[in-house]
Amino acid sequence: MVHHATKDSHIRKEFLPAFRPFLEAAELREVIDTLESDWITTGPKTHTFEEQFKEYVGSRFAVAVSSCTAALHLSLTASGIGSGDEVITSPLTFAATSNVIIHQGAKPIFADIDRETNNIAPESIEEKLTEQTKAIIPVHYAGHPCEMEEIDRIAKEHDLLIIEDAAHALAASYKNRAIGTLGDATCFSFYATKNITTAEGGMLTTNDEKLAQRARMLSLHGISTDAWQRYADGGSWYYEIIYPGYKYNMTDIQAAIGIHQLKRLPEMQKRREEIAKAYNDAFGNTEGIIIPTSRPYVRHAWHLYAIQVNTNVLKANRDTVIDALKARNIGTSVHFIPLHLHPYYRSQYGYKRGDFPNAEHFFDREISLPLYPRMTDDDVEDVITAVKHVTNEHKL
Ligand SMILES: Cc1ncc(COP(=O)(O)O)c(C=O)c1O
């Protein structure tokens, strides 16, 4: 339970950061154990982390890698997506989702978002289909699953792959099916701010054995056996290069952290849900704030609590509210500047403002409030007080 009261004059003494990781003694002990062992890079702990992760998600395979970006890149490479192909994704995402499409020599095609969930809209996907379309990368924005039933129908009808960007969506589910078991491949992030962290890291889950084998092989230079197998008792020095792969493997130091973060995930998710509920209760009737939607048939991972400033009701915009919250020692962030508005996309593909009106509308109003398990009840109360104060101050 989060208790809060409105103390209008109350201003936090110390700055509350937008994100903080949550590492405990168990993670530290396991890292030290790894450093004191004879195996510090990809080895037994990475293997254990993969086994436990696939059990948690319910997928047949899990491949631990150096980042979600690496998992996305490997999913495309292992699926044979390349030059001349088109991949449809959301403009409301981080650089990584689209960078890897371009790295493969394929073309990113954006489809506008749904105004309620802020996820890629299935009807926009349909408008963007061409003969060259090979895959869809749905991004589960903030941890709210995309409309996977509709996306699956489109993919089946047009013989497309689904590679999910689940950087925000560990612990999320769609119609009682876990994210990580739905698409051809799902990519998770363990970056410092994510629902679990290994500082940097990622995981690719899939039910497709061939894709898993190819991704694993490509994650370590495209060679036939990994170092752990080569150097283990009875291993052989011999290896063969099957394909010019990448250096995307996870280290055992990272996996040591991941094993304990994964164990603590249910407890950390419970806290995220509590805080999201406290915000929903506090801001549901706050004039000037539009709260995020959570459809009844999903489990939201609550990676982000993304509010929108209702500019019809306030004489303030996103930036004024961010500055006013900062002045009250509340850190925030913005997710994301839609990709098509960045200089590369404007110059390379001719995109401009107006091309994806829903993503732009959202971006112009979006603020991510602090939401992480280490927040105390007082921290949550401070955010609520500050947001209410700022909106009151800026009423039209
Ligand atoms: C939506 C989305 N996709 C992909 C990534 C990339 O994750 P990583 O930093 O693990 O490569 C991020 C990271 O912030 C993200 O927010």
Image (cartoon, rainbow, N blue to C red):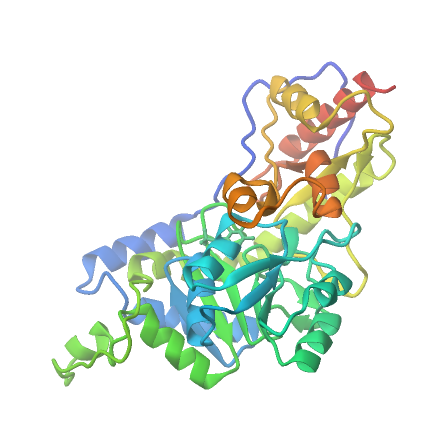
- x%, y% of residue 227? 21, 73
Q: Position of residue 53 (x, y in %)?
A: 48, 69
Q: Is residue 369 visible?
A: yes
Pick the front one: 188 or 165: 165
Q: Nearer the viewer, residue 303 or 27?
A: 303
Q: Residue 251, how many percent across, how many down?
A: 30, 61
Residue at point 62%, 51% (across, down): 91
In the rendered view, tell whether residue 294 sits above or below residue 18: below
What is the quadrant of the N terminus in the image? top right
Give the residue furthest to the left: 237
Which residue is pictured at 37% across the width and 59% down the height?
Answer: 66
Q: Is residue 336 something one can see in this rendering?
A: no
Seen in the picture, residue 48 relative to 69 is either above or below; the reply is below
Q: Quadrant of residue 226?
A: bottom left
Residue 169 appears left or right of 282: left
Using the image, determine if residue 84 lies above or below residue 24: below
Q: Quadrant of residue 13?
A: top right
Which residue sits at x=52%, y=69%?
85
* Residue 4 position in % (x across, y down): 75, 32
Residue 71 higher or lower than 78, as above or below: above
* 265 sits left or right of 238 in the view: right
Name the residue nearer the viewer: 313 or 342. 342
Q: Residue at x 39, y 74 (%)?
A: 215
Quadrant of image for the C terminus: top right
